[in-house]
Image (cartoon, rainbow, N blue to C red):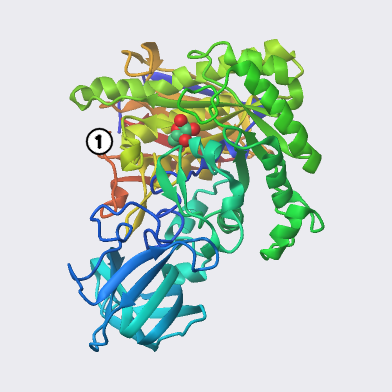
Amino acid sequence: MTGVATARIAVDASRRLGMVDRNLYGHFIEHLGRCINDGIWGEMLKSRKFVGADSNCDGLPDPWTLPVARDPQLVVSVDETQAGSGVPCLRMRVLRDDDRMHGVAQPGLALRAGATYSLQVWVRSEGALREVEVSLGGERVRRPAPGEQWEHWDLELTARWDAADARLLTGGRGEGELWVHAPSLMPKVTRQGGGFRPEVVELTRAIEAPIVRWPGGCFADAYQWRDGIGERDSRPVVFDAAWQQYEPNDFGTDEFMEWCGVVGAEPYICVNTGSASAEDAAAWVQYCNGSPGTQWGDRRAEGGHPQPYGVRYWGIGNETYGGWEIGNVPADEYGRLFLEFAEKMREQDPSIKLIAVGADPVQLPEWNRTVLEIVGDKMDYLSVHRYVPHTRDDEQREKQYAAIVAAPVDIESRLRMVRETIDEALGPDNQVKIAFDEWNVWLQAGASEGIAERYELRDAVFAAGVFNALHRLADSVTMANLAQLVNVLPAIATSSTGVWGTPLYHAFKLYAGRCLPVVVGCECEAPTFDAAEFGNIPALSEVPYLDASATMNEEGDRLALAVVNRHRTDDLRAEISLAGIGPVQSAEVALLCGESERAAGSEHLPEAVSISAAEIEVAGDSFEYTFPAHSATVISLRTN
Ligand code: AHR
């Protein structure tokens, strides 16, 4: 790649501007769509606790069904009480012993030939039922009927063939009743790994997610945390008012803590101010951080976790300013609510860090000031969320592209506005930081499709621009969480058979894996473009095509120069000067790119957007480099 340099990047490593908090590469998971259930959590059965809509009116919650349209020897019903926990169970009454199996099925299961599946289920029987039968993927297990006491069965079935739409069949033979409670089906390896999808764990580990926010989002303001603790099969299924879906509560506090441990992330919990009290939040802090001997510390220990989890980061409510949010209140009311929650939560653990709900400074200019004036330095962080562009127009792709890749410029200026408000309200010596704890490109993916946005390389260019902005704001913004990690506005996408990284994922991999802790001086001059207003992104003029940030290690012998080229079609050549570091001994370029800005990657083509690495020669204190169109690059330099 040759050409005349049209841009200049001047790195001055002697100017140390701030420290990058690793939490800038943080994530967020929510009980919404397929993020947790069917994304992170490996349960394969839907409605395993027999709660849900019955769209075909067969007496069974979807997708349970009768294997034959009409079975005159079988009566099925969902019984509310018999399992002893209040969780519904399924009752199958076989009317006549015709030596055939009568039962129910769940279709839509993806199986891999040779893989072993673990089915765990509670069963009991009455009358002269002789045998229980379960079959899946060509393998059948038969067992003598259990009798009147509940038994917990742990069965293994090995699929004989690959299938995209296999059925689990279960039922009884003889004359009598079979009761089934809380069946759970997972690949055996997933069960052995604690119930977490191993490929999601692996991809999450690979981007070194430092911190993960949970359980929402909007979900947080409807979530009763006590529903998600205790014996998993006995936890209630709750209709979630925020996202209008059934929540089985299989993934609760203990599962979140365990998963964070497995992926190596720090937990960040957002408590419910919408439909729960300060006492509820304080009890949750005690459940997580209290020692055995406290009421909730004991409950945690009873569940097998005697050591306190020591959760440090706690958000108090989510987007409380929004008309869509459960428990939405005005800013002054929220400020008072925050103080009440903070006091009770800190009584349980004074060391916790508290995040207050902040608002977008352009849309709601007064919210932050009011909350800051009431709460003062009782908050550790003020949170800000930003999704762009909240619209989609594929007819105007170039305009859409320009606005999205330019949006980090606007995001940076909004975050600076929030900083100014904090400093004005609390004085220049305040210690309050910004948690940019939900951000992403969100075009028009709707809640009914689980907000499963499909990302393109364009969105990785956007994310890289956000990271550069966050580096520049490192002293002020010390936490940021992409919304969300899996399947919803996703960094990681899953299907029933596979898991792959979206373009956003690669942006994380590029930056989190290579950028260093000290932000140093980096000036970039480049040709500019104007981006027209698009959705909630305002018109932006003179946006530089190239945007750069530079970070260094503490010792000063490694430097990472991160450069985004926002140009849709053109490569751009830059002259790069280096000051404040010794002679470069080795240089490696990592390039995140794809064939076009529309390259997306998918289960079957995961490398359509990818990172490639190469060594380059850097002699002296300046060199030229060509940055490909619609790309992000990190040049890693070593001086020893
Ligand atoms: O990330 C999806 C949703 O967007 C979150 O639940 C909410 O906080 C935001 O409005």
For label 1, being within 8 Å of ligand 1 is answered no
Q: Position of residue 13 (x, y in %)?
A: 62, 28
Residue 334 visible here? yes
Q: Position of residue 502 (x, y in %)?
A: 36, 44
In terms of image quadrants, where is residue 382? top right
- Residue positioned 66% across, 28% down in the render: 381
Residue 112 visible here? no
How many numbered tags mark residues here? 1
- Residue positioned 61% across, 17% down in the render: 331
Q: Nearer the viewer, residue 55 or 12?
A: 55
Q: Nearer the viewer, residue 211 or 375?
A: 375
Q: Is residue 11 above or below residue 138?
A: above
- Crowdedness near tag 1: few (<14), some (14–19) or many (≥20) residues, C-alpha within 10 Å: some
- State which quarter of the image contains the C terminus: top right
Q: Which residue is mark 1?
A: 596
- State which quarter of the image contains the N terminus: top left
- Residue positioned 64% across, 13% down in the render: 369
Give the left or right position of residue 532, taking residue 348 as reference. Answer: left
Q: Position of residue 20 (x, y in %)?
A: 62, 33
Q: Position of residue 615 (x, y in %)?
A: 43, 45
Q: Nearer the viewer, residue 153 or 77?
A: 77
Q: Amino acid at mark 1?
A: Ser
Q: Nearer the viewer, residue 293 or 483?
A: 293
Q: Is residue 57 above or below residue 410?
A: below
Tell me the SS state at disc 1.
loop
Give the left or right position of residue 299, taking residue 328 as reference. Answer: right
Q: Is residue 232 above or below residue 457?
A: below
